[in-house]
Image (cartoon, grey):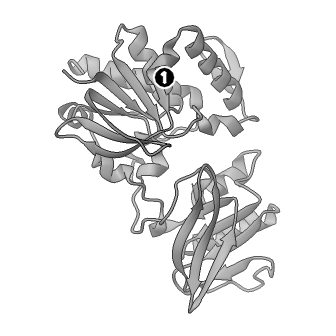
Amino acid sequence: MPDYDFIIIGGGVSGLGALEALLSSGHSNVALFEARDTLMYTNTWMKNIEVQNSSDSNSYTGTDFRMKILSNLKKSNNDKNIFTGMRVYFIDQQEKKIHLRSESGKREEYSYGTLIAAVGAAQIMYGKYLLPGSRGGRFFTSYQVGEMIEHYPFNPGEKLIIFGESLYTLDTALLANKSGISVTVVSPSELKLPENWPNDITVYDNAILKQVYGDTLFEGMLIQVGSAQINIPGDSIAVDGDLVLEHPWRKHLNVEWDLKNWKLDLSLSQMKKRNLVVIGDAFKPDPDFIKQYQSGAEMLNEFNKAGEV
């Protein structure tokens, strides 16, 4: 018998949605593990955009929706199934076990019947290079930064470091600079800067990335240019092109990303064979946090239609 019939990895909106769906359908031997101490972490700074909730006809900002979900968890006593500060460092899909490490360094392992992965999309994207260091908050792609500046009422941070080597790197740097953000560009190759490049955008090309700093949030990076090592402070980082974030989750789950359809390249039947359910942004990104909350239940329903999970 497994330690848990269902183990959910990730305490974001889709992970908590899956937890609620399982518990409300009668499953009790369920555990959710979240690496941070904070559940629905991304929603803590989503204070401006409201999303319509079809289930109660109300509109919620990300922070309001977070408070609603956490309040309901506490009232129903379902928060007893949640364990925070537990980071996965290895998944044995053959043995159906996950290995975790707590913030104190204690290591634990648990067997499961079905594993539900509710990790963020950026954590399993393709990429040539692994950024050495932490995986705190405020790690973005250049695309995400551009989308924030153009379409959302908030910026990625005040001191943005862009790590890349394409024209898109430079375009994003100019866009951020025009928005009043302090920008530093770091490239592993030589960049050809356009004419009239702003003097207040610092550029380090032919640079070697040595370390990325930060625990809960990104704090900066250490690079080497020639024989000099340079520490660059920052509160956000955007990574571009082939230098996209490549988190260990890609290897943990043994999955690939379908770039054409911008979703996980893993079919429902393949998931069933592996006793693995991938939900939320990890399956297909969607900025609507209420839809992501509902996506866990919807995916589990699809499994049930195809046979027992």
Q: For the point 27% across and 24% down, which residue is it?
A: 3
Depth order, front residue of 172/6: 6
Q: How far across and how far down the image is residue 61, in percent?
A: 71, 28
Q: Secondary structure at mark 1?
A: helix
Q: Does residue 256 appear in this view? A: no
Q: Which image quadrant is residue 287 in?
A: top right
Q: Residue at x 59, y 53 (%)?
A: 215
**Image quarter hosting the N terminus:** top left
Against 59, residue 117 (above or below) is below
Residue 36 at x, y percent in the picture: 54, 39
Which residue occupies the extreme bottom position in the image? 227
Image spot of residue 79 (x, y percent): 52, 18
Q: Where 26 sits versus 99, above or below? A: above
Indicate the position of residue 309 as horizontal and vertical percent values: 24, 21
**Amino acid under label 1?**
Gly
Tell me which residue sits at (22%, 40%) in the image.
Answer: 93
Q: Is residue 125 above or below residue 164?
A: above
Query: Which residue is drawn at the image coordinates 67% and 31% (left, top)?
Result: 62
Left or right relative to 11: residue 124: left
Q: Is residue 211 left or right of residue 47?
A: left
Q: Is 306 positioned to the left or the right of 121 in the image?
A: left
Q: Tell me how many marks there are.
A: 1
Dot 1 surroundings within 10 Å: few (below 14), some, or many (20 or more)?
many
Label 1, on which residue?
17
